[in-house]
Image: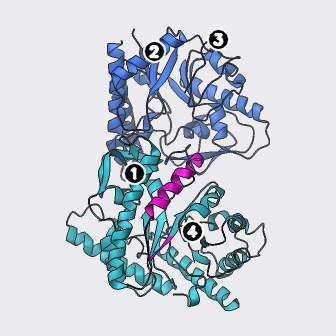
Amino acid sequence: MAADGILIFQEIGSFRKPDYLSSSFKKIKDQEEIRKLKERATLETIRLFENAGLDNIGVGGEMYRWEMYEHPATRISGIKFYGMVRSFDNRYYRKGSVIAPLSVKEHWHNDELEFVIKNTNKGIKVPLTGPYTMMDWSFNEYFSNRHSLALEFAELLNSEIRSLLDIWKRYHPEEKLQIQIDEPAATTHPDEMGIFTDAINRAVEGLTSVEISMHVCYSTDYRLLYDVSPELKIDGFNLEFANRDSLSVESSDNNRKAYAGLRYFADVDSEKFMGIGVTDVHSDIIESPELIASRIRYSLGIIDDPRRLRINPDCGLRTRSRGVGYEKLLNTSRAISMVREEL
Amino acid sequence: MKYKGLVFGIYPRSETLRKSINLWERGKLPLDELKQRITEEKDGILRFLEGLHLSHTDPLVNWHDILRPLALSLTNVRLGELHRYRETNTFYRQPVITGDVEYRNQDNVEHDGFPYFPAFQTASSADMIGFIPGPHSFIAMSRVETDVERGKLLREVATAASKFIEAYGLDEVVIYDPIPFGGADLFYLSDLVERFRVTLISAGDVTASSLRGIGKDLHALSARSIPAGAFDGPVYLQVVDSQNTKLEDPHEISATLDLEAENNEWSDVGITHTEYLDFLPRRIADEKVRLMGEVLAHGS
């Protein structure tokens, strides 16, 4: 962990799976065989993250998961799959239909968390797909409205966090469990921010010994999120910025325009931490330590408490090769060291 | 009362076609074989729709999104980043408009090699209806990087769309506007509605003022709501939900049709769906279309 929690360097979630796992993930039916492959890939990715200098290795790149919606949805009773629907071009995903009240039929991430706990001394953060996104990405055949369905998913998420907490407490009774709620759909329906807020607050209701962060990416308007920030019962955000920023090292409002949006956040919420994305996960360009350091310094000019500023890639690095992903993380680590020395 | 029905826009690909395209993308299926499979898929869908006595556009299973073939057929338009389609979890390649647009011959279009063309399979069906996105939506869903005046740009896109349809020898077309145009004047469609039998479908409301210049030449109209007396021609009610797998009750649809026809004094009324059907799994789209056929078969 970073000294005094200053500029904590964290992963966001997914990392490119090794070929031996991605090529067999859905083909191998033998549960024992696929479990061994997931464990092998998780171990390799944890070591890669540790070597890159991450303070928090997440869950080792989500090697246990194929897709953020389908993974939990297939473990919930009350959801039926009729087939694939298009995401874009010829890319499709299995979109479930909610046809009955929902209940957990199999825990979503318990096996993954337990394996990761046993295999690292670094910080751990468990990403979970949020209730609003689960609702928005499902067909609703049963509930009277989207609000009711979002709250139903929130109930399930709350129970899943409690289940993860039970495992965590066995190994780390004195430490908080870090949960990251992933909500890519958060701001896609501007008139539903109330539903979003209610669902998040229900998902975390009554939880103690848990630090809750939220990851949202590629929003067209983060101010929608910042506006409800004071009402959200979470500890912080992990967002993307780098893809919207210039590649110029020189620090100015114009060059750092993506991070300038933090001022709005700082104005509306002075409590929550902010994890800033400093590397673009949709580009093979390896950002230099100097560029990343410039982004961090600029952000520190807005959120001046380095304990409230965390550093991460924009999103999961599964979009890049493992080699490129590693290089991006390594340069981020170098940049953080540079800035920490200046503080 | 007997009704009619219309199925428009991109129909969901079958698993077989989806996997065929995956194979082609990985270099494991020749382009000619893929084209053949697309033709067969379209033929199968057309036989299915015609067996149910539904009017239909081309099934468009070779369209990756509703803008792409038209975007590729325009000068000063390039394809940009993926962009969210309305408030859905489906994405389209956003056109970037950089200047005055004109129609260009599709033989000269440079793209990723996927067989977007022919956009319509005209030989398969005698009563094939073409499909284009409304110029208003095309521009609203694009990134405009030109200072060409908006009214001029609307006319240019409409003219190019007209040539796009004309290239296939079609005389009937559905113009679909997923982005509501509210009360805006649809003057730019006047040439299109004079030259073709146009069914205008809007995901939003229409007003009498927006139809003022084109209403008399418009063949048919469908919108979320149509003010009484705003349009005299055939009307399609959007009674089948394209964004939910829950199947509608055909009896309820018939009752809704009867009520709406009586309340609005519509003599020529039909049914269609809310969005194009590509937001549904193929199996459910087939079920919903079958259900539409059932309403037509039994009337009320």
Amino acid type of the residue that numbered disc 4 sits on in the rendered structure: Phe
Image mark 3: chain: B
Which image quarter holds the N terminus of chain B?
top left
Numbered disc 4: secondary structure: strand
Question: Are the two marked residues, 4 and 1, in contact with CB atoms closer than 8 angstroms?
Answer: no
Q: A24 left or right of A194?
A: left
Residue B154: image x %, image y %?
71, 31
Query: Pointer 1: what residue?
Result: A93
Q: Which chain is cyan?
A: A
Residue B294 lies in quadrant:
top left
Q: A262 left or right of B297?
A: right
Amino acid type of the residue that numbered disc 2 sits on in the rendered structure: Leu
Distance between the Cα atoms at labels 4 and 3? Answer: 55 Å
Q: Which chain is blue?
A: B
Dot 2 alpha-carbon crowd within 10 angstroms: few under 14, some 14 to 19, many 20 or more: few
Query: Pointer 4: what residue?
Result: A237
Residue B225: image x %, image y %?
56, 24
Image mark 2: chain: B
Q: Nearer the viewer, mark 4 or mark 1?
A: 4
Same subunit, labels 3 and 2: the answer reads yes
Numbered disc 2: secondary structure: helix
Residue B81: image x %, image y %?
60, 52
Q: Is residue B55 magenta?
A: no
Same subunit, labels 4 and 2: the answer reads no
Dot 3 alpha-carbon crowd within 10 angstroms: few under 14, some 14 to 19, many 20 or more: few
Q: Is residue B241 visible?
A: yes
What's drawn in magenta, residue-wise?
A187-212
Amino acid type of the residue that numbered disc 3 sits on in the rendered structure: Lys
Dot 1 alpha-carbon crowd within 10 angstroms: few under 14, some 14 to 19, many 20 or more: some
**Residue at point 47%, 54% (across, down):** A132
Amino acid type of the residue that numbered disc 1 sits on in the rendered structure: Tyr
Query: Pointer 3: what residue?
Result: B216
